[in-house]
Image (tube, rainbow, N blue to C red):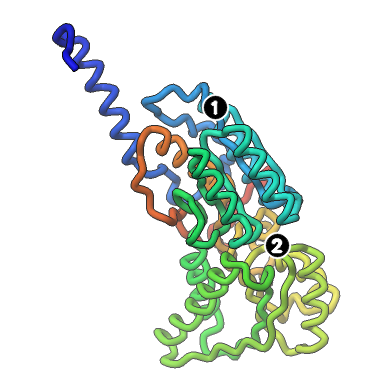
Amino acid sequence: MKLKNHLSIKDLIKVFVVCSVLLIVGCAEPIEKSDNSRKSESSDDALIESAIDLSGKTIGYCSPTLNAPYYQALLQSIKETTEKNGMTFLSADGQDDINKQVAAVEDLITKGVDALLLNPKDPDALVGVTKLAKAAGIPVFIIDSSIDPSAEYVTTIQSNNLANGELAGEWLAKKFGKEKMNIALLSGNAGNPVGRTRKQGLLQGISEEQLRSLGYIDLNIQTQAYTDWSYAGGLQAMEDILVAHPDINVVITESDVCVLGAIKAIAQAGKTDDILIVAGADGQKEAIKYIMETDFYGCTAMNSPVQIGKNAVIYAIQYMNGKKDFSKTSFTAPLLITKENAAQYYNPNALF
């Protein structure tokens, strides 16, 4: 193909500017505050530079459920960031039913979204729809949770569950020192990959700190119970644990939500002075308030739905601008919340 005319200097400058913007957008990682501050939970700073016109683009998001503050905050973050950047936002709710989530994702694919953000209820059951999306030319971004590696997706965006758990476990081991810990573990549900990683981090953090400071490991976990990631589940699990294991003095948990209901059972048993709670995630506002105002909730780790949602949209825009070399997992910065810094992250008006 022959050029009819030589480019003018002015045209060359325009080409250079456009290419430079594309290079910056294509290579840059999402910019996040190192402290994951919860004080300003808006997307006012989420206007993302793009070398292409985003006004005709559509972001689709499917949540496993909206029946929890975390999922509502994540949805709101994605919606605000998408719309602030001039794109259309479509959402679907899996309604805590795997078959409904599969159908909801299929509907978003049929509507022809330009990028699909997916928070899978199950790591295996959603593999098929990711392959349907790829066949339709739609990039898939897994957010918050995980999916089987056989799925077709660009990257997973989530908090650093292992590192956060390690920070919480290390804090606990330092707190107890040589004092005997009788531990109850409250988990979400069996087989959940995120919960498993958080649990692994907690146990690693405890073990490593004990080896460093004591020279031995005394990991005395007396029982584990599943809460189905719910207030009611935590309450029931803790009631049963206190009957079967009255000498429990530590509760470690994979999520704030697993233990918020358990606090009621602990209080009813008159044991708030006898039991210390440590969470591997999430930084939920109710948990932060307990940390600020009591001594029985020791720490939690930040799993910010606002930052995860924002990062997911940033990655989608980067993909649209030509970036393809994503790591398979992209983390937000790990952060431990204790009494010393809790006020910095407490926002009573936050959704989560």
Indicate the amino acid at tag 1: Met
User: Going 73% across and 54% down the picture, which residue do you hit?
Assistant: 99
Q: Position of residue 117 (x, y in %)?
A: 56, 44
Label 2 close to label 1 by CB (< 8 Å) = no
- Element on which disc 2 rests: helix
Give the crowd class for mark 2: few <14, some 14-19, many >=20 residues within 10 Å: many
User: Going 59% across and 61% down the picture, which residue do you hit?
Assistant: 123
Q: Looking at the image, which is closer to me, 269 or 50?
A: 50
Query: CA gap, disc 2 to disc 1?
Result: 33 Å
Label number found at residue 257:
2
Residue at numbered disc 1:
87
Q: Position of residue 146 (x, y in %)?
A: 55, 59
Q: Position of residue 151 (x, y in %)?
A: 51, 56
Nearer-N-terminus badge (2/1): 1
User: Going 72% across and 81% down the picture, which residue do you hit?
Assistant: 274
Q: Based on the displayed image, in which of its 4 quarters is residue 4 positioned?
A: top left
Looking at the image, residue 161 sits to the left or right of residue 235; the answer is left
Label number found at residue 212:
none
Q: Position of residue 280 (x, y in %)?
A: 58, 67
User: Going 60% across and 62% down the picture, which residue do you hit?
Assistant: 124
The mark lying in front, picked from 2 and 1, is 1
- Element on which disc 1 rests: loop
